[in-house]
Amino acid sequence: MPISAQKKRRVAAYARVSTEEDDQLSSYEAQVSYYSSFIKSNPEWEFVEVYSDEGISGTHTKKREGFLRMIDDAVNHKKIDLILTKSVSRFARNTVDSLSTIRLLKENGVEVYFEKENIYTFDSKGEMLLTIMSSIAQEESRSISENVSWGMQRRFEEGKYSVGYSTFLGYDKGNDGKLVINPEQAKTVRYIFTRFLEGKTPYSIAKELMERKMKTGAGNDKWSTESVVRILQNEKYCGKAILQKTYKRDLLSKRITNNGEVRKYLVENGHEAIIPPEQFEMAQQELESRRKETRQHSSKSIFTSKLVCGDCGSFYGSKVWHSTDKYRSVVWQCNNKFKADKKCTTPHLREGVIKNVFIKAVNSIVTDKGPAIDMMNHIKAKIDDTAALEGKLEKATTAFDEKMVLLQDYISKNAITEKELADGRYSELEKDYREALAEKEKLQDELTERKRRSLMIKRFIDEVISFDDLFTEFSENLWLGLVDVIVVMDKKKFMVKFKGGMEVPVEL
């Protein structure tokens, strides 16, 4: 364990004797005596106190005065650096309570050592063991809060749900207790989704909302990037409600998004939609796409991260020429043009040229859109055929569940020693568990990516179908909605790559 060279670690211990134990008093006194001597004998430790609860069963944490006083001293009064205790079962009333308390202590820089299990909570191996133990605690968690959980489950199963109506944008509470659309607020919701799918960033949308004096659900004028994203992610706007969207993975971590690890409840058509389901799904895929991109979407220019050098693969950036005189102009050139040993030969571009390349690419599709639509539909059909992938994912999920159960059983039945961690059965089980988890997550990501591509292709097809005449003017919304990147080959040759996957060569 790391020990500060500047000051001693302040060490306390916790002792408890169950009401079910024989000879309670002698056992209790023995624990207090043992820990007092043990701590005081270590020259690198400063003895704080042996906190104790005599003859307490541990069924209710609130009755354990010694335990609660210790936590208060550690968290609120910063008196303790390390707590020693006999075992996880002695530390708190159950696994769930132990893990919750450990998390609180960790957040406040306090470590716990469980003697029987040989676990230090700050140790990487200890963290792994405690993480796995948390999954064992899920059943206990249901038991501890049986009445509350039963009521919540019943509400979920019956499709009953509510929102914070005073701050929830777009809906009011109806006479029957269900969500009803607020027509004026719904305009704001539709504006957010439309602008996002046109290519605007949540930051720029928030700025536009404030400029237009459009109010939040709470009636405020101030919008943030986060508030826009939350609206884009909320499925209630498409008439659905997903219940139990968050959960605690291991009770040592904070509540996180439920991506299928535990049961969810989907309520469809429980209330009227503001956003069509298809448009909502496109927004989700666009959010995911932007998150995965290594480049950042910038609100500075619609051309940022859209132009790629055909020589080195770097993005183009904007440069200002003659910034101080009347000939001032903005051009775009490869960001690495003068950084590499071999200078890129691709040209700088004025924005008028970029716009002309885009117009020419779109018009080449408009003049003969039948073959383009057929080709994209063919690609979409292949992408949508996910039966084999879903079969692999089902098998991988089953394999993962089996590995997790084996590991949980081993942990629950054995006190793991350092030797077993290094080369024993535990290491083998833990390796199998991690490999199964990696395979499952890889297949889940592949399935998500296919769905994203399918929606992008559909969006592209819908746009092409809507084209009636040739374009003579540049459309910012069309640019943001359709273009992935334009690869600059030379001053006359370009490759326009659309978001659906279609590529159109352009020569000027």
Image (tube, rainbow, N blue to C red):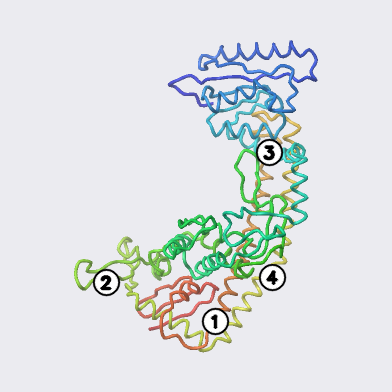
Mark toward the viewer: 1 or 4? 1
Query: Which residue is denoted by mark 4 in the rendering?
Result: 385
Marks 1 & 3, CB-CB < 8 Å contact: no
Residue nearest the observer in this picture, 103 or 317: 103
Characterize the local packing of mark 3: few (<14), some (14-19) or many (20 or more) Cα atoms within 10 angstroms. many
**Which comes sooner in the sequence, label 4 or label 3?**
3
Task: Work out whether mark 1 precedes mark 2 in sequence or the reverse, and give the earlier one.
Answer: 2
Which tag, 3 or 2, sits closer to the chain's start? 3
Mark 2 and mark 4 in contact? Answer it, CB < 8 Å. Answer: no
Name the amino acid, label 2: Ser
Can you name the residue that lies furthest to the left here?
325
Residue, disc 2:
329
**Residue 212 sits in quarter:** bottom left
Q: Are marks 3 and 2 in contact (CB under 8 Å)?
A: no
Q: CA distance from mark 4 to mark 3?
A: 38 Å
Residue drawn where x is 51% and y is 66% of the image: 196
Q: Position of residue 312 (x, y in %)?
A: 39, 66
Considering only order in the chain, which callout, 3 or 1, is on the residue closer to the N terminus?
3
Quadrant for the N terminus, please.
top right
In this picture, residue 360 sits left or right of residue 244: left
* Residue identified by numbered label 1: 464
Label 2: which secondary element: strand
Circle 4: residue type? Asp
Q: Which mark is residue 113?
A: none
From mark 1 to mark 2, how far is it between C-alphas?
34 Å
Q: Secondary structure at mark 4?
A: loop
In space, the residues marked 2 and 4 are separated at their CA atoms by 49 Å
Crowding at dot 4, Cα within 10 Å, few <14 / some 14-19 / many 20+, comes out as few
Residue drawn at (34%, 78%) of the image: 352
- Which mark is on residue 134? 3
Which quadrant is the C terminus positioned in? bottom left
